[in-house]
Image: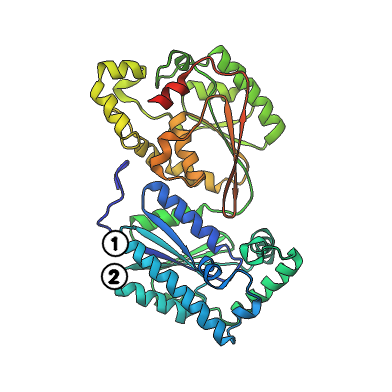
């Protein structure tokens, strides 16, 4: 796929079928895949069988419901699983590109049933199996997510943990690892300590595997802020490589205080190659990494102009940008779609890094990164609010991302954000 191109609609439909015992991170991995592929522009959706079970059979099912010897429970769970599968196939038939079927799928029999139904409609299936033999990781996952899941809402934690361990024991009795005869698979061992690949071919699958190689479950925050106000911000000009204004330098000092008090010296700092982000980072008195991939959207021939000048000198370009800010590409420059493509290595590194990260960047770039972190559709990127002199603290969780915003003095003199919003 060329940078900035839409995903090909001629490629085969694809389903990732999750496999693994409970508390092995299947749903965490599935959500990550959905977020990544959606951010790249693929129409992607996850179908979680547990959600179907809760909706149809109720939330509070005791561990005995999951006992392989419970014939009624087995049939009920099979019916729910098939309902989720049929909805997944309908999604793909109605225009979806990629689907994730999230369930334990813990036996060869169940996986064969899923694969056969997908084969009937010509759907390519890749199994993604998450295994874990580290009891510390499993215990942490049980207490951090499962014991607080909708299945145990209102149940005391110790009681929930005890019941969930018994549920796991039921699955362990019948669990069978994915075999080579079952088709393509990715096996993730101990949350990325080791990965086994079988018959993984093609550009898209290679990208997904590369993405999965960088995942971890260590809790850490991601901080984002635009550079301090620049001389071009004051003038309302886009692009360029202007230095900070006096107000921008004052913001950089305030940012340094917040980083020292709230994050500490262990934070990993990234900037673009442009002067205004580097000058902002220098006030931190910490090492920082300079990324060309974090440079602001290339405004091409419009670099250094105001939006009013573009409207007057190039009215057709101004109108085209108004009509589709996501796909609009400045003459000899970039679009938001292009920015997303070049940020892919940054996403991999962001997922890999286990220390807190502070990204000092630019409006378009941070909008794209924010859309990824917060699982927002790519088309919303150009409309995400990322004002000057504001710090965004994003805290990834098992099922999403929490956000806090900190506005720091001094307020920028420029009214650049207001103009950009109006545009």
The alpha-carbon separation of the residues under discs 1 and 2 comes to 8 Å
Rate crowding at label 1 as few (under 14), some (14 to 19) or many (20 or more) other CA atoms within 10 Å. few
Q: Secondary structure at mark 1?
A: loop
Instruction: Return the mark for residue 167.
Output: none
Tell me if residue 269 comes above or below residue 151 in the rendering. Answer: above
Q: How is the model colour-coded?
A: rainbow
Could you tell me which secondary element the residue under label 2 belongs to?
Answer: loop
Residue named by callout 2: 122
Q: Position of residue 378 (x, y in %)?
A: 40, 43
Query: Which is more toward the observer, 45 or 256?
Result: 45
Which residue occupies 69% across, 61% down?
A: 143
Name the quarter where the C terminus is drawn. Answer: top left
Q: Is residue 16 above or below residue 279?
A: below
* Percent position of residue 270, x then y: 54, 33
Is residue 403 depicted above or below 256 in this figure? below
Q: Residues within 10 Å of mark 2 (few under 14, many from 20)?
A: few
User: Is residue 112 rendered to the left or right of residue 142?
Assistant: left
The spot of residue 77 in percent (x, y) is: 52, 77
| 269 to 230, vertically: above or below | below
For residue 313, side relative to residue 107 (left or right): left
Is 340 in front, or is 323?
323
Who's the residue at 64% across and 49% down the image? 219
Residue under pointer 1: 12
* Label 1–label 2 contact, CB within 8 A: yes
Q: Earlier in the sequence, mark 1 or mark 2?
A: 1
């Amino acid at each position: 796929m060329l940078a900035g191109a839409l995903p090909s609609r001629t490629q085969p439909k694809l389903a990732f079928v999750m496999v693994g015992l409970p508390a092995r991170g299947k749903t965490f991995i599935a959500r990550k895949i959905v977020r990544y592929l959606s951010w790249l522009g693929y129409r992607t959706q996850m179908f979680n069988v547990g959600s179907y079970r809760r909706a149809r059979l109720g939330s509070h099912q005791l561990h005995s419901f999951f006992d392989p010897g419970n014939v009624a429970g087995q049939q009920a769970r099979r019916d729910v699983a098939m309902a989720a599968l049929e909805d997944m196939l309908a999604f793909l038939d109605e225009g979806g590109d990629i689907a994730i079927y999230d369930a334990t799928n813990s036996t060869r029999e169940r996986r064969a049933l899923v694969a056969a139904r997908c084969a009937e409609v010509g759907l390519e299936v890749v199994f993604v199996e998450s295994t874990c033999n580290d009891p510390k990781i499993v215990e942490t996952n049980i207490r951090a997510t499962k014991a607080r899941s909708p299945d145990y809402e209102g149940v005391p934690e110790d009681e929930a943990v005890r019941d969930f361990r018994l549920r796991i024991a039921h699955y362990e009795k019948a669990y069978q690892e994915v075999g080579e005869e079952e088709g393509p698979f990715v096996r993730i061992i101990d949350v990325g300590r080791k990965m086994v690949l079988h018959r993984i071919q093609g550009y898209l699958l290679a990208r997904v595997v590369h993405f999965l190689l960088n995942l971890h479950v260590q809790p850490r925050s991601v901080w984002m802020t635009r550079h301090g106000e620049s001389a071009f911000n004051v003038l309302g000009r886009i692009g360029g490589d202007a230095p900070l204004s006096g107000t921008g330098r004052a913001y950089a000092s305030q940012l340094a205080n917040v980083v020292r008090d709230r994050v500490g010296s262990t934070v990993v700092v990234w900037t673009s190659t442009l002067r205004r982000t580097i000058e902002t980072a220098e006030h931190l008195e910490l090492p920082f990494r300079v990324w060309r991939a974090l440079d602001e959207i290339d405004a091409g021939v419009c670099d250094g102009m105001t939006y009013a000048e573009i409207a007057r000198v190039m009215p057709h370009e101004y109108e085209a940008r108004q009509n589709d800010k996501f796909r609009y590409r400045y003459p000899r420059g970039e679009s938001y779609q292009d920015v997303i493509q070049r940020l892919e290595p940054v996403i991999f590194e962001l997922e890999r890094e286990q220390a807190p990260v502070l990204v000092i960047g630019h409006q378009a770039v941070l909008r794209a990164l924010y859309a990824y972190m917060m699982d927002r559709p790519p088309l919303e990127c150009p409309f995400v609010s990322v004002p000057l002199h504001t710090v965004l603290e994003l805290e990834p969780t098992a099922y999403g991302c929490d956000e806090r915003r900190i506005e720091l003095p001094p307020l920028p003199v420029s009214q650049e954000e207001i103009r950009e919003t109006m545009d």
